[in-house]
Each structure stands twice: as structure tokens, then as C-alpha cells.
Image (cartoon, rainbow, N blue to C red):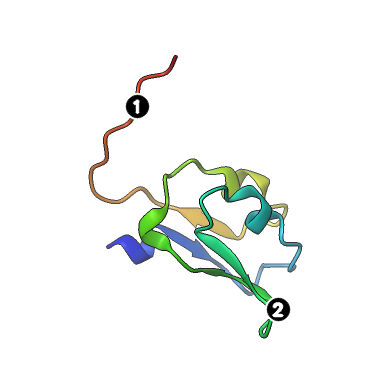
Amino acid sequence: MASEAVSIDLNMCNGCKVCVDACFVDVIRWDDEKKRPIVAYPEDCVWCFACKIACPTGCIKVVPTGFRRIPAAY
């Protein structure tokens, strides 16, 4: 299921916004009202793991779902 590709454990999140800055495809957005990150567009995740790697608290989980063609490295 695409909505499970990226998940954020909000109990561990410190609200630093690093994941929002790291996500270059805007899958993770900032909710100004709730002052927390949200997975806004999970279907657009390219499984780059930038958000997971950048997160200082380790609260982000990325699970590749389905099949997607992975481009060859240059």
C-alpha cells in the first residue's frame, strides 16, 4: 500500500523540520497548525531514504512498496 511507504513516529519526532528540507519531492510537508511533519504525498516517494538518513531522532521509516524501475547509475 502506497500510504505505508513512509511513516513518521510522531512520539519520537522533535519537530526539527530536517525531513521536510531533505525531501526533494515534497512527500513530507510541514503542518503549521499541528506543528509537525506529515506524509502528504506518499505515492510520490522515490525511496531515496534522504528523510530517514537526515532525521536526528530516527523516527522515519521508509519501506519500498510495489515495483518501480530503478534507473541505472551514470
Q: Which mark is residue 71?
A: 1
Q: Indicate the position of residue 72 as horizontal and vertical percent values.
A: 35, 20
Which amino acid lies under the numbered mark 1 shown in the image of this protein? Pro
Residue 10 location, quadrant? bottom right
Instruction: Pick whichever, 1 or 33, lies toward us.
Output: 33
The image quarter containing residue 36 is bottom right
Name the amino acid type tagged 2.
Lys
User: Crowding near pointer 1: few (<14 within 10 Å), some, many (20+)?
Assistant: few
Disc ID at residue 48: none
Where 49 falls versus 61 (above or below)? Answer: above
Mark 1 and mark 2: Cα distance apart in space: 36 Å
- Is 41 positioned to the left or the right of 8 in the image? left
Residue located 39% across and 54% down the image:
44
- Judging depth in this view, the residue of 70 and 59 nearest the camera is 70
Asked if marks 1 and 2 touch (Cβ < 8 Å), the reply is no
Q: Residue 31 placed where, x, y %? A: 63, 76
Q: Is residue 69 above or below residue 8?
A: above
* Residue 51 x/y as whole percent: 59, 50
Task: Identify the secondary structure beneath mark 1.
Answer: loop
In which quadrant will I find the C terminus? top left
At a point 64% along the width and 48% down the height, the residue shown is 22
Disc on the earlier residue, 1 or 2: 2
Mark 2 — residue?
35
On screen, residue 72 above or below 42: above
Residue at 72%, 52% in the rendered image: 56
Q: What quarter of the picture does the N terminus occupy?
A: bottom left
Location of residue 50 in the rendering, given as x and y in whole percent from the top left corner: 58, 43
